[in-house]
Image (cartoon, grey):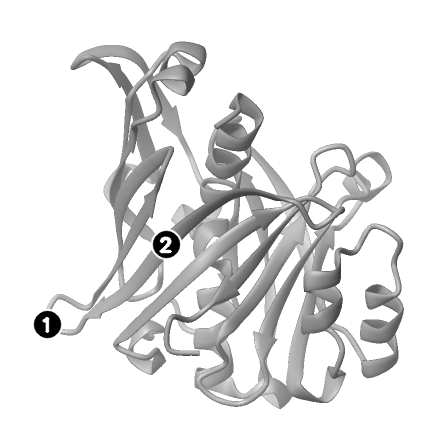
């Protein structure tokens, strides 16, 4: 696996902090299916597969937590989130020796400390600490982009599409930077226009082929930042409950990659 692929995966898994309107104590995970398993393909705009991994979302009802387990050829990880889908703790292990040599670590640990409103990141190589960072998410919320589809899924179950209000802060956990993020639901005509894009691979065009069967959310920077970083992100969910995750993509045009989700039972 090339370094760019690993970098893409790390960025995707640790990029966003999202805040939904409403109570800060109301549970989001109680509305989710107890377990969801997906195979995820990362593909280029030409439709070429670069990487494949499996993700298992499991609601731990007694603990009121979500456990996310990722298993791929290049890395594995287990992460826990609270009832509001805020990070509790997680650990990622890089298992590709070539990538270990390039990135300089083989294990990354993330721990949230709510009372200090911070996240501690520690990078290890052969059990020796290489780097430690302290990050401060806005409003002490840190829902990662790796569970963004799950977040939207939970909001749909909780509020329904007619009452869904969604806004947030973009949080790059690697760089420690934050940006305001705006979200909109695309109309059928907008979905068709999106599907007609020259850099949209056939696998994604197939998912977007019937706008009546899907919800497509567009996320982009707001304020003055949007003039400097015009990047946009898209999340596609199945319209029918339980609103399965179908696709995610976005970011800079140079590193644009698409994530295609499929369920083993489908």
* Nearer to us in this view, 177 or 174: 174
- Residue at 39%, 10% (x, y): give it: 101
Neighbor class of circle 1 (other Cα within 10 Å; few <14, some 14-19, many 20+) is few
Could you say where residue 184 lies in the image, as x and y percent from the top left?
72, 69
Circles 1 and 2: CB distance less than 8 Å?
no
Note whether 168 is above or below 130 in the view shown: below
Q: Give the number of the disc on residue 6.
A: none
Note whether 224 is above or below 139 in the view shown: above
- Residue at 70%, 50% (x, y): give it: 47
The quarter of the picture where residue 117 lies is top left
For discs 1 and 2, the disc positioned in front in the rendered view:
2
Which residue was labeled with disc 1? Answer: 62
Q: CA distance from mark 1 to mark 2?
A: 25 Å
Which is nearer the N-term, disc 1 or disc 2?
Answer: 2
- Residue at 42%, 34% (x, y): give it: 136
Could you say where residue 25 lies in the image, as x and y percent from the top left?
32, 69
Residue found farthest to the left: 62
Could you say where residue 35 lies in the image, as x and y percent from the top left?
27, 73
* Nearer to us in this view, 168 or 262: 262
Could you say where residue 233 lies in the image, as x and y percent from the top left?
68, 53
Asked if residue 144 can be seen in this view, the reply is yes
Secondary structure at badge 2 equals strand
Indicate left or right for 49 with 229 as reference: left
Asked if residue 22 can be seen in this view, the reply is no
- Residue at 44%, 78% (x, y): give it: 266
Which residue was labeled with disc 2? Answer: 54
């Amino acid at each position: 696996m090339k370094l760019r692929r690993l970098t893409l995966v790390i960025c995707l898994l640790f990029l966003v902090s999202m805040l939904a309107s409403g109570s800060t104590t109301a549970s989001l995970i109680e509305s989710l299916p107890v377990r969801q398993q997906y195979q995820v393909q990362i593909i280029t705009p030409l439709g070429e597969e670069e990487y494949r991994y499996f993700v298992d979302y499991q609601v731990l009802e007694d603990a009121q937590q979500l456990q996310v387990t990722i298993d791929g050829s290049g890395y594995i990880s287990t992460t826990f989130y609270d009832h509001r889908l805020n990070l509790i703790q997680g650990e990622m292990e890089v298992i590709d020796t070539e990538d270990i040599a390039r990135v300089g670590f083989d294990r990354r640990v993330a721990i949230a400390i709510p009372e200090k409103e911070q996240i501690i990141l520690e990078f290890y190589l052969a059990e020796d600490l290489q780097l430690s960072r302290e990050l401060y998410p806005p409003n002490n919320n840190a829902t990662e982009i790796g569970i963004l589809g799950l977040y939207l899924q939970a909001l749909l179950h909780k509020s329904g599409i007619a009452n869904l209000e969604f806004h947030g802060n973009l949080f790059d956990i690697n760089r420690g930077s934050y940006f305001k993020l705006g979200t909109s639901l695309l109309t059928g005509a907008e979905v068709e226009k999106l599907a007609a894009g020259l850099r949209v691979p056939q696998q994604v065009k197939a998912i977007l082929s019937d706008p009546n069967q899907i919800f497509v959310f567009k996320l982009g920077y707001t304020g003055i930042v949007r003039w400097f970083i015009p990047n946009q992100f898209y999340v596609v969910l199945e319209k029918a409950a339980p609103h399965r995750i179908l696709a995610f993509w976005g970011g800079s045009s140079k590193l644009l990659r698409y994530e295609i989700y499929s369920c083993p039972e489908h």
